Amino acid sequence: MNPLLQPFDTAPFSKIKNEHFKPAFLQAMEDARAEIDAITENKEEPSFENTIVALEFSGQQLDRISSVFFNLNSAETNEEIQKIAQEVSPLLSEFSNDITLNEGLFKRIKYVFDAREDLDLSVEESTLLEKKYKSFSRNGANLPEDKKKRLREIDSELSKLKLTFGENVLAETNKYEMHLTNEKDVAGLPEGEKEAAAQLAKSKEKEGWLVTLDYPSYIPFMKYAKNRELRKELSLAFGSKGFHHDELDNQENVLKIAKLRHERAQLLDYETHAHFVLVERMAETPEKVQEFLNELLLKAKPAAEHEFQELSQFANELDGLDQLQKWDASYYSEKLKQKLFNLDDEILKPYFKLENVINGVFKVAEKLFDLKFKEVNNVDKYHEEVLTYEVYDQKDNFISLFYADFHPRKGKRGGAWMTSYKSQYKKDGKNIRPHISNVCNFTRSTSSKPSLLTFNEVTTLFHEFGHGLHGMLANTTYPSLSGTSVYWDFVELPSQVMENWCYEKEALELFAHHYETGELIPMELVQKIKESATFQEGMQTLRQLSFGLLDMAWHAQDPTAIEDVKAFETLAFTGTQLYPETPETCMSTAFSHIFQGGYSSGYYSYKWAEVLDADAFAYFKENGIFNKTIASKFKDNVLSMGGTENPMELYKRFRGQEPKVEALLERAGLL
């Protein structure tokens, strides 16, 4: 019995063995093909119900199997799972092409689409129809046979290349270790960080201390370690992932991905990959994105240069440093921040015990959106560290299942993300509720201390939880329009807006208590957190813009002539460089957001959504950060609506106006 082929509600992790995956994929694809055949062979005249809705609800078992498998490949992978991913990804890509290039099916969809004016559809139905039609026309349905064939080849190759890219980055991260045995080499590290490094060494049966490229290990070392040579070594190791001209090198993968994406866009009659992507975004065109990034660059660059000057001078006065390098950035920034605000992560961390922060984000959600979170132990999970919660509203209606997975492991990729194991939708009079997951890589507890978060980790938890709420509160009819299935430059609004509560006294009072004494975080510390929120904002903004501009450089022009990844990247960074160039490092070869994840031509959306989030939070601030009326407007018009309507319409319904870029500039202190 293959557990993935039985009906299941929650993912049956404990019953699944690796050998179940491939047969389950093959069977589910066959079943989904039969469902598609039933639509195309239907003798009745094509209608919204028998074609569009039937297509929407086809292949649901395949979707569930995919979500279980690919989530595991990110959060709890191993060589066997990675091998299966390499085998099934091209099959899934082929399957997806079989559907979008199915002429009989497209004919029926086009028939309904052409008759849309006479169908009296709701807004959500119209959106679904347009989305289905576009997913075919934008993926080759109108192409002649030879071009369809080439499109299939490109998609199959891209699916493999993206997986290989990600596997290489993970392998590079896991491969590197800095083993230190001399007490002098960990000078400057706070006690907790030292203990964590010693614990890591011990877990691998080594003496001394171990530092890795996982964020909870890497970031504190870069921030506190006095030994500049070791910071340099670690920084270069981190910055050169996939750039060692060996079997894990990603340069060739980057070039192939960029060129294949461009060829694909051209096949479909778009000028570049960015032109293809942005038609389905709030920004609409590469020109608008460039204009947006350049406008922010104009405002941020003078501030960034001034801050860099200030930091350089500080490092010079402190340690006689003539030239700041990338491996000095965190170290001296932290020292300067301590000097200016008398604030340091180590003073804050005792107030941010992981369990308290989790309860805090739940309380914020309760006060804003009337949600209750109940930890349960009867839900199957893929790793013992995963926490599971049932989410209810005030009337005890079940809202969602929520998984939370907070610490780094060997089989887990870096970073933090939200994902889903089951979408919300309505069918046969039932509102099927979603299963949502947050995955992060936070500092672990040690033998003497619980998991204490840095303030940055606190905002990350709130950020991912904002995505989580977008998934949990979904209330739409169709799964493909539910939750986070929205325009990519809108998807970061719910996550980024949640971060704002971390800076507010009223919210911090709910959870920021000292883990030993229970004392509430002193209000002068809260004041300092707020004052320091815009510390080096110019440099931070410049850094984000540089990533957005690099993404557009790869995707908004013809990449066929590019031969040297590093040279091309250096050129793309010219307007945003503050630190001297390091020939040993390359960002693109580990830029997973755009070469493995879904952010190609979309990295700008973090900044784009910041405009929305600053404007949205300004509305809360004017009326009280726990104002129920505004929270309800946000829930009803943004969080629950998914992708059922144009996001700008949803935003205006919540806010009463279009967002203003000034809100962001004001918050960032860049006006």
Image (tube, grey):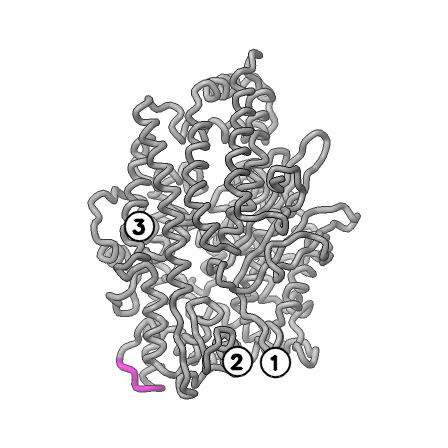
Asked if the residue at tag 2 contacts the one at tag 1, i.e. Cβ–Cβ closer than 8 Å, the answer is yes
Task: Estimate the spatial distance between the alpha carbons at disc 3 and disc 1, rounded to whole Å.
Answer: 44 Å
Q: Nearer the viewer, mark 3 or mark 2?
A: 2
The residues tagged by marks 1 and 2 sit, at their Cα atoms, a distance apart of: 9 Å
Three-letter residue code for mark 2: Glu
Instruction: List x then y, in percent, for residue 139.
Output: 40, 31
Instruction: Look at 37% across and 52% down and name the residue there.
Output: 165
**Amino acid on which the number 1 mark rests in the picture:** Ser
Residue corresponding to mark 3: 254
Vertical placement of residue 593 versus 191, above or below = above
Q: Residue at x 62, y 74 (%)?
A: 450
Does the magenta-highlighted stretch encompass residue 358? no
3 or 1: tag closer to the N-terminus: 3
Callout 3 secondary element: helix
> Could you say which is closer to the camera, residue 582 or residue 571?
582
From the viewer's perspective, is residue 65 above or below residue 546?
Answer: above
Residue found at x 25% / y 44%: 559
Q: Position of residue 239 (x, y in %)?
A: 34, 65
Q: Is residue 641 visible?
A: no
Q: Count the labels in the image.
A: 3
Q: According to the image, label 1 marks what residue?
A: 448
Q: Position of residue 616 (x, y in %)?
A: 56, 53
Return the disc, 3 or 2, that comes first in the chain's sequence.
2
Instruction: Name the residue that disc number 2 marks.
Output: 195
Amino acid at the residue labelled 3: Val
Pick out the residue farthest to the right: 395
Question: In the rendered structure, which segment of residues is drawn in magenta?
Answer: 318-322
